[in-house]
Amino acid sequence: MIDPTNNDEIIVKAKEFFREVIGENHIKNTKKLSNINNFNVNPFLNKYLANFLTGNDSPESIAKALIYPRVLGTSITTSFGSNLQKFINTTLEGYGSTTSGIDIEFIDKIDNRKKYCQIKAGPQTINYDDVTTIENHFKKAINLGRTNGVPIANMDCVVGVFYGEQNELSQFYKTINQNYTVLIGKEFWFHLTGDEDFYNKITDAIGEIANEFDGRDLLELTTKELAKKLKEIDTLE
């Protein structure tokens, strides 16, 4: 278990997580894209998007138009979101919570109060139903504290958002922020670690992991395999 007072350990664990979980899953999910069944092929848009991207609508261009948005957008974003709990359990294990519905507990380095925190990925990653769920978790934590003689104020119930800025928060986060506390990006990591520059340090450290991954060959191979299947379909029609 990491020492929650040692910020360097958080950096090391975060790099391990991105290398071994996010990076490896990204590769695995990219390989799957050689299978045409992983796409809802839209005959109205595919050729347009291919021409927009490459200037022609060859099977290779259509394959690129299908694959690139997945690899550079939805695939890696979904992978991070779905593995967020792993990040909490590995990178932030020293802050683990035994309170139902609470991801981590920590002593706020700014006001020195204990915080009961739910972790979210980014400023647009919750929906309408999540608001009620999060607020119910906080109410239960406050009631449990009252039962056990542990005073927990609304200000001690926190949503910690890994990245982004306050002005990027969705209306759903703003609704929660009316009664509780939403800390996002640099602000969240500052309250967690006491290092005002920690957000930049951890994002820079994770950026170093990018140098270990070069997906050009994999992208080229996956594109060729998908293009081959697109040609076969075109031949059958």
Image (tube, rainbow, N blue to C red):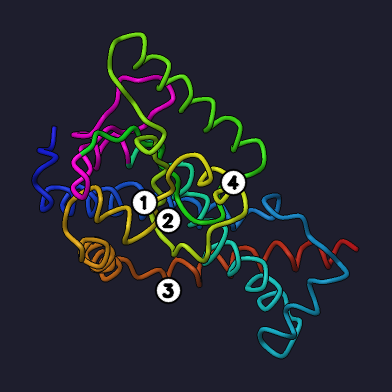
Answer whether residue 102 is magenta in the image.
Answer: yes
Residue, x 76% and y 55% (percent of image)?
40
Please state the extent of the stretch shown in magenta in the rendering: 88-112
Query: Mark 2 = which residue?
Result: 27
The kind of secondary structure element at disc 3 is helix
**Disc assigned to residue 216:** 3
Relative vertical location of residue 20 with respect to residue 103 in this rendering, above or below: below
Which of marks 1 and 4 precedes in the sequence? 1
Neighbor class of circle 1 (other Cα within 10 Å; few <14, some 14-19, many 20+) is: some
**Disc assigned to residue 175:** 4
The amino acid at mark 1 is Glu
Q: Quadrant of residue 119?
A: top left
Neighbor class of circle 4 (other Cα within 10 Å; few <14, some 14-19, many 20+) is: some
Q: Do residues under tags 1 and 2 come within 8 Å of each other at their CB atoms?
A: yes
The residue mark sitting in front, 4 or 1, is 4
Classified by dominant secondary structure, the portion drawn in magenta counts as loop
Horizontal side of 64 relative to 161 (left or right) equals right
Horizontal and vertical percent for residue 34? 59, 58
Query: Mark 1 = which residue?
Result: 24
